[in-house]
Image (spheres, grey):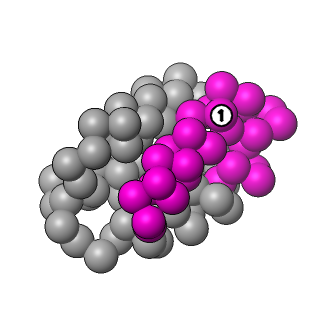
């Protein structure tokens, strides 16, 4: 994952996740997403890039309205992944 734009966008998602307070079910979704993002930093050559994009797309639907900054950060990360062909 050498792309600095992607790294920055994923760090922003992690930052926004840390600021987001929500119900237990959605918090679980955010915790899993945060873990998967961290895994990308820890293992940049893994196959988890595609599942991360799917998970981000799903999370955008759940958080965009109630947590617009988080939703926007997720959309930027998805765009960064798309720009890399992921």
Where, quadrant-wise, is the C terminus in this rendering?
A: bottom left
Residue 55 percent coordinates (x, y): 56, 63
At a point 64% along the width and 59% down the height, the residue shown is: 57
Residue bounds of the magenta highlight: 59-86
Residue 72 appears anywhere in the view: yes
Apparent side of residue 28 relative to residue 71 in the rendered image (left or right): left
Indicate the position of residue 28 as horizontal and vertical percent values.
55, 53
Q: Which residue is mark 1?
A: 72
**Residue 21 image position (x, y, % from top left):** 63, 30
- Per the image, label 1 sits on a secondary structure element best described as helix
Residue 31 in view, yes or no: no
- The residue positioned 19% from the left and 59% from the top of the image is 44
Q: Does the stretch in magenta take in 41? A: no
Q: Quadrant of residue 75 in the image? A: top right
Q: Place residue 85 in its image quadrant.
A: bottom left
Quarter holding residue 40: bottom left
Using residue 54 as the reference point, say whether residue 49 is left or right of it: left
Q: Residue furthest right?
A: 65
Picture residue at 37% right of the left edge, 43% below the top: 6
């Amino acid at each position: 994952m050498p792309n600095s734009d992607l790294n920055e966008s994923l760090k922003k998602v992690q930052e926004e996740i840390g600021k987001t307070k929500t119900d237990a079910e959605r918090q679980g979704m955010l915790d899993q997403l945060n873990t998967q993002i961290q895994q990308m930093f820890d293992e940049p050559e893994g196959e988890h890039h595609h599942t991360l994009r799917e998970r981000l797309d799903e999370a955008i639907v759940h958080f965009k309205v109630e947590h617009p900054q988080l939703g926007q950060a997720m959309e930027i990360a998805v765009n960064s992944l798309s720009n890399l062909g992921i």
